[in-house]
Image (tube, helix red, strand yellow):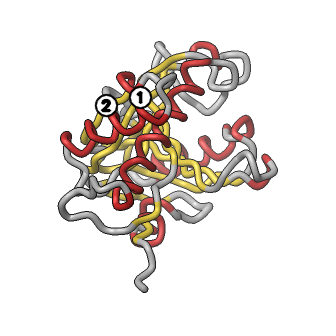
Amino acid sequence: MLAAFDFKKEFKDLYLPKDKPGIVDVPTMCLIMVDGWGDPNTSPLYKAAVEVLYGLSYSIKMSKKSGTQPEGYFDYVVPPLEGLWWFKDNVFDGSVIGRKDEFSWVMMIRQPEFVTPAVFETAKVSLAKKKPALDTTIARLEELTEGLCAQIMHIGSYDDEPPTVAALEQFIEDNGYRTEMSGMRQHHEIYLGDPRKTAPEKFRTVIRHPIVRI
């Protein structure tokens, strides 16, 4: 039996960077997204967003067992949760203590290429039947093109990110680039592993910033 396709293993340059900064050209990809705002630790909207994202993603993955398997389907591991984060003043240096309630965010999970708008709508119907209390209308299927970015692996608590972000920004400057955040190109985090089962000091988070050549 063939192993399930794992985006993290197949695209290590995107999901498994070193703990030293590097540059990557991120291709266009399709993701399920939910917009929101506020402190992710206390916001009901954030909790709902994550539940809907995983619910839809697993509905699509398990469609092979429900008779609604999409054309081109292949077995795969659901990719990790990701988030775009910014403040209204658009200044992000990793320091968020005391400011988390000011966050704007987009939480998202990548989808395989066979996930079309029709497949997405079928998943919404399926999830609504299983969990009618969930509001699936908050989710959308959208392409994201980040392009040229610098990224680094952060090991540790989310609140301890500032030194890692500072190292990333220094690398960007030293290599003749500048960070340029606008639209959907923002401070980007990819969460590897399950924080519910991992000690904070062992969290692994990909931190990615969009860049342009000076």
Q: Which mark is residue 102?
A: none
Q: Earlier in the sequence, mark 2 or mark 1?
A: 1
User: Mark 2, residues whose alpha carbon is within 10 Å: few (<14), some, or many (≥20)?
Assistant: some
Looking at the rendered structure, the kind of residue marked 2 is Arg
165 vs 127, left or right, is right
Picture residue at 58% right of the left edge, 48% below the top: 191
Task: Please state the horizontal and vertical placement of residue 167, each as a whole percent of the image.
Answer: 60, 48
Decide if residue 187 is in sight here: no
Q: Residue at x 44, y 68 (%)?
A: 6
Label pair 2/1, CB-CB below 8 angstroms: yes
Mark sitting on residue 140:
2
Looking at this view, is 57 or 108 the one in front?
57
- Quarter of the figure that contains the N terminus: bottom left
- Near-viewer residue (66 or 139): 66
Q: Where is mark 1, residue-wise?
A: 34
Q: Is residue 204 left or right of residue 139?
A: right
Q: Quadrant of residue 202?
A: bottom right
**Residue at the location (59% across, 61% down)?**
20
Q: Amino acid at mark 1?
A: Val
Asked where in the image residue 114 lies, by quadrant, the reply is bottom left
C-alpha distance separating marks 2 and 1: 7 Å
In the rendering, at what x and y percent does residue 82 appear?
A: 49, 43
168 lies above or below 96: below
Q: Nearer the viewer, residue 73 or 187?
A: 73
